[in-house]
Amino acid sequence: MDGGSRVAEVLQAHGVRFVFTLCGGHISPILVGCENRGLRVIDVRHEANAVFAADAVSRLTGVPGVAAVTAGPGVTNTITAIKNAQMAQSPLVLLGGATATVLRGRGSLQDIDQMALIKPHVKYAARPNTVREIVPALERAFHEAVSGVPGPVFVELAVDLLYDEEVVREWYVNKTDRPARNLGEAAIKNYLKVHLANQFAFKDFREANPPESADVPTHTDRQVQKAADMLRRAERPVLLVGSQAMLHPRRVHELAAAVEKLNIPVFLSGMARGLLGKDHPLQMRHKRGKALKESDVVVLAGTPMDFRLDYGGHIGRAKVISVNRDADDLTKNRKPELAVLSDPHQFLVDLADIGAQPTRPDWYEAVKGRHDARCAEIDAMADAPVDAHLNPMKVCQSLEKHLTEDSILVVDGGDFVATAAYICQPRKPLSWLDPGVFGTLGVGAGFALGAKLVRPEADVWLVYGDGSAGFTIAEFDTFVRHGVAVNALVGNDAGWTQIARDQVTMLGSDVAVKLRHTDYDVVAKGFGAQGIRMDEDKRIDADFSQALEASRGGEPVLINALIGRTSFRDGSISM
């Protein structure tokens, strides 16, 4: 069994179903080994999108996704996606090819110090030097990825560890087949023979093991009781649930039941969007800042007080209960009254089991009243005329009407995507994918690819800004080649509008924020997908219906929606 097959064996033992890649000679044995074991190998058009796809698989299944990339530029092209996964606390495994073990540092093709480059951005990095070290290194990588604060891991695999022993021995023989002309050459020949023998010694010393249980910090009964007491005394409590609470996809309905049982107004962010379905009475989507300012107890479940909460400034004089796996995030920018280093999902479940909370009708009505008023404002703005083309809010409202219980929303962009976030509601848990705290443009096609593979029965909607579409539109070739029927909606206003709103107002210049009303629908057709140009009010609903009919028939679709500009998000840039 060659090293590539050993890699595939470990992936299979850990429940991996898909391997995302862009081909390279350094990693060919991994890809062939995976194919031979029945793992589906999906090749993309840029390495970053292989990592983004693996990230999406991780988030939706709880099993670390896997990307395999070739040496040098293959690895460097993944850095943004790896950093995004690290900051989003998303577990995944990156396999990186590398030059032969004996050629490191000697000017070999694509040979760089990959370990120094990638170590700051991963939880764990390993470089096996013999075939027998491959399995233990990979098993530890999977364990590290899901333990503690989850995140990406990296395993570098030299090319001479992956090919069959007979092939590698032939390479080495070709380097040493002539007689030694001096003591130096004789020493080199002897070194290579010893090195080769060590590389393959005990190469099959054990089979891959099933995954170990993750190491996760746990809370105490006393901490749960203290939190329960604080909430019972509270008159105006608020619960914020973030992405870190969603790390147990198979138990997500247990978490939803716990949130309902706590019976306090809740705001959901990141991967937690959709946890309670559509229009749940406890879920509030608007005027979060006002609710936090007025609250007396705030529960932060898996979300830190970073820029998204104005570094803690959004929370007034309220007492804070913070639950997080990350010790740094627990106390970021403000020390909570109760800091619990634990898994937010399990803490909320245990907290809800203690007993029912008071109903607090006055507080609920105040928060709900502001939420409903904002919804009415948005409806009114959606009916208002715009400078040209379609009202983006109206387009988003039509998308909202066409979402089903099985729809997944993947968002990748600035102004248009943020507008959609106010209007479009995922119908069930694990149906919303955004980049996370890093705010990375370019996650869309990779996320959509992973999501559609994991849930092929779902309508996967990739909501693009026209700026972000430029990062990954070539992956429509991937969608077509692999039969992955994704729907994409491009909000095309010919500009980097989120930046332009403040730049033009504050600095009086539109330098570098102008684009064109590019025919993205024609681009999609060029890759073999269906393209729809949306530019008539009366046809918006029909265009969405046409897209769904095509995608449900197995054809990827891109809707190029030409939109105008509104004042809806003026002054909304956040840094």
Image: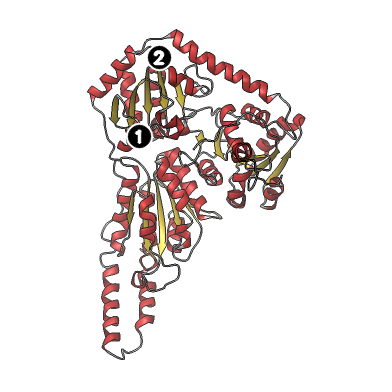
Give percent across and percent down for residue 442: 54, 46
Give percent across and percent down for residue 406: 55, 31
Query: In the figure, residue 160 lies in which quadrant?
Result: bottom left
User: How would you rate the neighbour count of disc 1 (Cα within 10 Å): few for under 14, some for 14-19, many for 20 or more?
Assistant: some
User: How would you rate the neighbour count of disc 2 (Cα within 10 Å): few for under 14, some for 14-19, many for 20 or more?
Assistant: many
Q: Looking at this view, name the residue that lies furthest to the front.
A: 507
Q: Name the residue carrying label 1.
A: 332
- Viewer-side residue, 434 vs 416: 416
Q: In this view, does 319 lie above or below 420?
A: above
Q: Is residue 182 left or right of residue 250?
A: left
Identify the residue shown where x is 54% and y is 41%.
452
- Viewer-side residue, 340 vs 56: 340
Please report contact status of discs 2 and 1: CB closer than 8 Å, yes or no: no
- Viewer-side residue, 112 vs 496: 496
Residue 36 can be seen in this image: yes
Residue 283 can be seen in this image: no
Q: Name the amino acid type tagged 1.
A: Lys
Q: Name the residue carrying label 2.
A: 236
Q: Quadrant of the N terminus?
A: bottom left
Q: Is residue 164 left or right of residue 472?
A: left
Query: Mark 2: which secondary structure?
Result: loop
The mark nearer the N terminus, 2 or 1, is 2
